[in-house]
Image (cartoon, coloured by chain):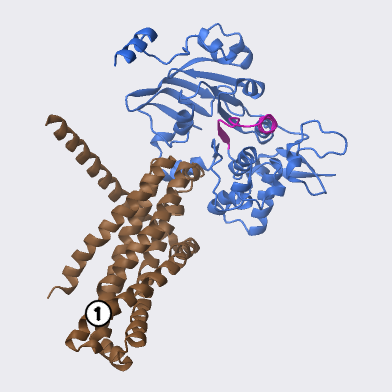
Amino acid sequence: MTDLLAHLGRWSLGFFERLGRGHMFLVSLIAALPQLAVQWRLVVVQIWSTGVQSLSIIVVSGTFVGMVLALQGYNTLVDFGAAESLGIVVAKSLTRELGPVIAALLFAGRAGSALTAEIGFMKATEQLAGMEMMAVDPLRRVVAPRYLGGVIAMPLLATIFTAVGILGGFFTGVGMLGVDDGAFWSQMQASVTLKEDVFNGVIVKSLVFGAVVCWISVFEGYDAVPTSEGVSAATTRTVVHSSLAILGLDFVLTALMFNK
Amino acid sequence: MSRVCIPAGNARGQGWATGGKFLILCRHAQPRSPTASYQSAAPARGVRREPRILSVNVPANIPGDDPLVAIRDLRFSRGDRLILDGIDIDIPRGKITAILGPSGTGKTTLLRMIGAQLYPEAGTVTVDGQNVHKLDRKSLYALRKRMGMLFQAGALLTDIDVFENVAFPLREHTDLPEAMIRNIVLMKLELVGLRGARRLYPRELSGGMARRVALARAIALDPMMIMYDEPFSGQDPISMGILVELIKELNHALGLTSVLVTHDVAETAGIADYMYVLSGSKVIGHGTPDELARDGSAMVKQFLQGLPDGPVAFHYPAEEFTADLIAGSEA
């Protein structure tokens, strides 16, 4: 029993110590962001690396999610004679939940893990220490551009995911299941609002997810034990912690935004 | 073949201001093959040489009683393990000082203390009159611009090529026009014999070439000192010979202060002006290579002569062998 308590105490101390370190890291990271104004090219490179290079998985996944959503929605709505409302179901589901959440989960798996592995590898091969000895702050030169690039890329990816998802739903609903295309688009237009669904649902949620996923990713890389096992463990932690954070934050944000 | 004078100072004009410090390099007209850089020091007729410093005017002011780096009563632990205990070391200006010792004795830790990448539990490290562990970030970075460090693995940035690696500190710390950066980078690469490899990526370099590129990068800002972390480990004899020559010639030509952390005794003794031997967290001997060779200490003798057994035991501490075997069979 004493051993169990001691183990629990050690685990708790380690957890809170790491949480504190992570927050101190975030403060230093945010303080370094203004300096990127003169080195904006570094951010553009990272938007390409985290955003453009994630496009294929986002587009393919978005299309299939939209198609499946339309298929399932049609099967339910048709029993109530409301198949023409398929556009609303697809658009609302994608803008409020599936678009930002699935895009963020894919982003964590594709770009977040790559960020952790890259920074962890740079640490293991002394590239970060080398920069420090050249009087170059690795937080400013390496970490901050990757963080900001990821935060900018995330809402763009979520928007693209949502848009191609709606097109996938249109293709299945109208093209395959015979829903009237005028009803599909007009009901969607009448129901989806710019502020609640597009801005709150897609943009704000994905911006928050992007900020948290990128924070976890760069911190795990920067804090990784500089060995191959250490970098591997850090990459795994990035995907697990990011996924849990996305799902937890989604509930909180949904409760705040859409609770009537 | 033609001769070209290159100022040994940096692009901010320090080289010109100090006066009298000029490297005279061989410049070759024909392009160099990648393997040619491994030619021995005395090539056959018609075979190209490494870029050699033909004449050197060493700065006159190399004081002996004003060390560039002064380490006093330094103490550092990792967990329960004491790494450094009461270390006192002086690194004289303009000389090559070697810090030798078996693996795991804290030599690299000591270098990181000098660069203020690690902080000691007790003691001081003073570089050029400044206590590095008391400096604020801005002052520390200003000091680090005057300190080069060659890491064991080279620490080259893997996503950019050789040219950009050497240009990296210049782009970060100066506003020089592109044409001048190009010239400086090519001069530095010529010094280490890798001008022809400037478009290669670090993954395409051998271990020795990577260290030479890292050396070119370390001298890009013309620092006052360079710290070498195990520069010879894992090198073939040719690469090792090239590195030994480069360290010696760069030190003398540029008026640098060099700190060499290594366990390669023979190569180091050939170029070092002064040597310290670390073992068991302490300095167990120091002196010129000749003085250390005559040192009567059993520990120094064991390390310098590479004896398998001595004060540093061959066996890691363990219980008595027979008792250990019996305990295993009973289990």
Residue B97 visible? The answer is: yes
Residue linked to disc 1 = A73
Residue A85's x, y, as percent? 23, 87
Please state the horizontal and vertical placement of residue B233, each as a whole percent of the image. 58, 30
Chain A palette colour? brown
- Is residue B222 one of those drawn in magenta? no
Q: Horizontal placement of A108 versus B94: left or right?
A: left
Spot the blue chain and give its letter: B
Which residue is the extreme one toward the right? B45
Residue B303 in which image quadrant: top right
The answer to which of B293 and A249 lies nearer the viewer is: A249
The amino acid pointed to by label 1 is: Gly
Task: Choose between B287 and B51: the one closer to the eye.
Answer: B51
Residue closest to the far top: B296
Q: Seen in the image, is A49 located left or right of residue A169?
A: right
Provide the chain ID for the residue under circle 1. A
Q: Position of residue A201 (x, y in %)?
A: 26, 74
The residue positioned 46% from the left and 67% from the top of the image is A52
Instruction: Tell whether B218 sits left or right of A116.
Output: right
Local crowd size for mark 1, using a 10 Å CA cut-off: few (<14), some (14–19), many (≥20): many
Please tell me which residue lies in front, A167 or B254: A167
The magenta stretch is B224-245
Q: Is residue B40 left or right of residue B162?
A: right
- Badge 1 element: helix
- Identify the residue at horizontal 17%, vertical 86% (top origin): A80
Q: Is residue B128 above or below residue B7?
A: above
Is residue A223 among the parts visible in the rendering? no
